[in-house]
Each structure stands twice: as structure tokens, then as C-alpha cells.
Amino acid sequence: MTRNSEAKALEAFLLQHVRQNGGISFAEYMSQCLYHPQYGYYMVSRDRIGKGGDFFTSSSVHSLFGRLIAKQLHEMWDILGRDAFTVVEQGAGEGHLCLDILDSIADDFPDFYEAMTYQLVEISPDNRTRQKTLLSRHLARVDWCEFADLKNIRGCFLSNELVDAFPVRLFEKHNGVLKEVYVVAGENGLGEELRPLEDPHITDYFRTVGIEPVEGNRFEVNLPAVEWMHAVADVLEVGFVLTVDYGYPAGELYAPFRRNGTLMCYRNHQSSDNPYDAPGSQDITAHIDFTALQKFGAERGLVTLFFGPQYKFLMALGFVETLMEMQAREPDEKRARALRLTLKNLIVPDGGMGETFKVLVQGKGVDEPALLCNRSLRDIPLPGAFA
Ligand SMILES: C[S@@+](CC[C@H](N)C(=O)[O-])C[C@H]1O[C@@H](n2cnc3c(N)ncnc32)[C@H](O)[C@@H]1O
């Protein structure tokens, strides 16, 4: 089937599904667009990540991202007593982060490599196939499983851009009352309707994150993120949760100036705010609420050990020093400059990956260790490397 006919088939299915149900929540719509077993964006075979796809992720920018995370994982292994250690990565895309982490651990920390298992949890059959091919040299360490099979994990639960791919519900507040956006079928195809809110989970959510939604604004609530945070905390016996994603603390995410929320779609590196355009052929995402992950995680015993922008996390783990070493090994000035420019993407603030992306590290049963990622930026030697 061509891309066009897949989108048409999904649109026809959605129209019928919406009619049959008299309207569906936006989360149900988003879930079908992304995860419909036959036509969903993540379920079909296509390039999604990188130059030939729809968007870049940090792991598709350069292997240094994974190498620095590997350093943090090594320290976590040390803290847990150098016993058997499991990294669970959920939503690994094509598997590049896993590959970079395992390559780096195999090279730099061989005793850790021998002690570890890397479990991948992946919803997309297409991505699972890509991961199996890419990770062929690490098959002795890597395994695939369902989330429901996880239990008593001692190690680290890792994800990069997973939570933003969970289906969100949409709301608006008018005359002091919260209304939910439903997707309905009209004569001209799919449209939207505001319906009374009938779910106490939403008011509980806002009470927990300490926010009063702003009159007149549209906003998203990612309830699967809450269930996920609880489930991750429950399967983790002792260790860490390391979550990288774009998002904000609740006060910033639900700020008055964000009149239309943060829902965005990506196709061929173009962004759009129309989720109804060619369903299944574009990614749909929303920025995540890091306050929710921290507050709901705390309900199940997770303690925040680090929260900050990606640039701080990577710099603390040795971004600058590693870049200097890599440059020193590169005699060709043109290639050295190209390397600097590529790597800069990972740490650029002001709307770049360095600040849009945040890192949250939580711990369970580990006291409050001063992790490497908490190293003060004042302790980092700053060369003229970024000139
Ligand atoms: C934006 S991609 C993340 C890319 C990847 N982590 C990287 O660094 O390039 C989202 C990934 O999450 C997966 N995914 C979404 N929901 C999931 C779920 N509930 N369980 C497992 N994987 C999921 C998608 O199939 C995809 O692999």
C-alpha cells in the first residue's frame, strides 16, 4: 500500500469509528492515528527519525548523547553495588541510543557490560525489526519484552522522547468551566466539539500539579503519563528512572500565554498544528508535564535526583571534555568544525535541543546520591571549542 492509500484507509476507518461511537475523545483519535495496528504512524514501515524521516532525536544527532548517558548508567551501577543491573529502555525508536550506550559500555566499562542486561519495550513491530537489525552485535546483552512482563527491576528505566508520544486529551476552559474536545464526524469529514467534562481524574490531576487552568485557553492532559509513571515506579525494585523529553514544569506548560497548548505534528521535518491532516502520515506529539512525573512518581516512592535542561545534564557528564578529546583526534580542521557544529545541536539553548529537552532523574531505594549529572557547571573547563 502507498503512503497515500494508508492515510485514506485510516481516515475512512476513523470516520466510521467516530460515527459509530457518536464522537471520541482526542486521546482516542491520537491513539488511532499513531498506533492503529495496520495504519498507525508508528505501526507502518517507514522512516520516521533522522534526515530521511520526519524529525530528529538527540540520539539521531550524534553517538555522544548515548556515550554520556552510558557514563551516568555506569555510576548508577556503582551506586547499586556492581551487581546484576538491568537497563529498561521503552520506546527506543530505531535503537540508536541503545546501540551507542552498549558500544560505549563495551569499550569503556567491560566489567559493567558483563553484568548488565538491556531490555527493550517497543510498541511498534516496524521499530522492533529495525532495532533487531541495528543491535545484532549486542544480542547477548539485549532482549525484547512487553511492559507487563517487567518485574523487580534493579537498574535504570530509560526513555528518550517516549512520553510525548502518549495520547493526550484536550480541554478548554470557558466561563470558569472545563470542557473536553471530542472528535466528531460532520458532513465535511472530521471536526471537533466541546463537551462537558465528566472525569474526576482531570480535576485530581490539576490539584496534584498545583495548577488552575487559564480561562479561554486550550491545553492537553497526558493521563497515560501518570499511569506510566506509577507503573514504572511499581516495577522498579531499586534504582533509577531517567526520562528525556521536551516539556516544562506545570507552571510553564499551562502558562496563560500558551493559548492553544503545545500539540504539534511533524512530517518531512515540517511542523503543523493540524492533527486532522492525512491521519497516520504524520507524528502527533505534545510537550510533557515534568511536574506531573515528579508528583505522581513521588506517590509511588520516586525521589527527584536531577531535573534540568539537556545542556546542563550533558555538560555535567563531560560533554565539553569529550568534545575536546574528539577534536584533538581529528587533524582535519574542516571535519573538526563540522563535528563541533553537529554536537552543538545537542546543547544549544533558546529553543534548541539543549533547553527544549529536559532530563529528569528519579531514584527509588537509593537515598539521595550526588549523581555525576549534578556536577556544577562551574567545575567544567571552558575552552574556545565553540568559537
Ligand atoms: C519519538 S520515538 C522515540 C525515539 C527514540 N527514543 C530515539 O531516541 O530516537 C517514540 C518511540 O516510542 C514508541 N512507543 C510509543 N508508545 C509506546 C509504548 N506505550 N510502549 C512502547 N513503545 C512506545 C514508538 O514506537 C517509538 O519507538
Image (cartoon, rainbow, N blue to C red):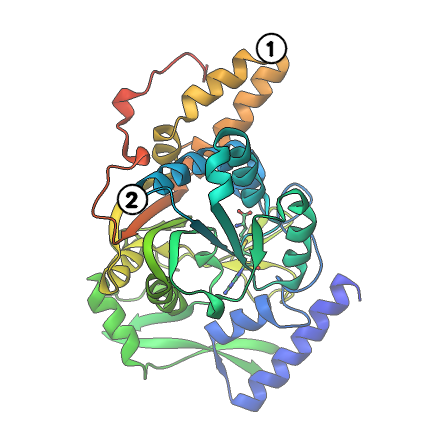
Q: Mark 1 sits on what residue?
A: 333
- Counting from the top left corner in percent of width and height, residue 312 is at 34, 33
- Rendered position, 197 above or below 286: below
Task: Check disc 1 and give the amino acid type.
Answer: Glu
Please state which of residues 167 and 96 is positioned toward the viewer in this rendering. 96
Q: Which mark is residue 166?
A: none
- Counting from the top left corner in percent of width and height, residue 125 is at 65, 63
At 42% from the left and 26% from the top, the residue drawn is 319
How many other residues sit within 10 Å of disc 1, few (<14), some (14-19) or many (≥20)?
Answer: few
Extreme-right residue of the structure: 1
Q: The residue tagged with tag 1: helix, strand or loop?
A: helix
Q: The residue tagged with tag 2: helix, strand or loop?
A: strand
Total number of numbered discs in the rendering: 2
N-terminal of the two: label 2 or label 1? 2
Task: Check disc 2 and give the amino acid type.
Answer: Phe
Circles 2 and 1, Cβ within 8 Å, touching? The answer is no
Res. 45 image quadrant: bottom right
- Counting from the top left corner in percent of width and height, residue 65 is at 49, 35
Please state which of residues 62 and 107 is positioned toward the viewer in this rendering. 107
How many other residues sit within 10 Å of disc 2, few (<14), some (14-19) or many (≥20)?
Answer: many
Q: Mark 2 sits on what residue?
A: 307
Res. 34 image quadrant: bottom right
Q: Is residue 299 left or right of residue 118?
A: left
- Counting from the top left corner in percent of width and height, residue 241 is at 36, 52
- Rendered position, 46 above or below 200: above
At 69% from the left and 63% from the top, the residue drawn is 44
At 37% from the left and 28% from the top, the residue drawn is 315
- Rendered position, 53 above or below 128: above
Q: Is residue 102 left or right of residue 232?
A: right
Please state which of residues 8 and 321 is positioned toward the viewer in this rendering. 321
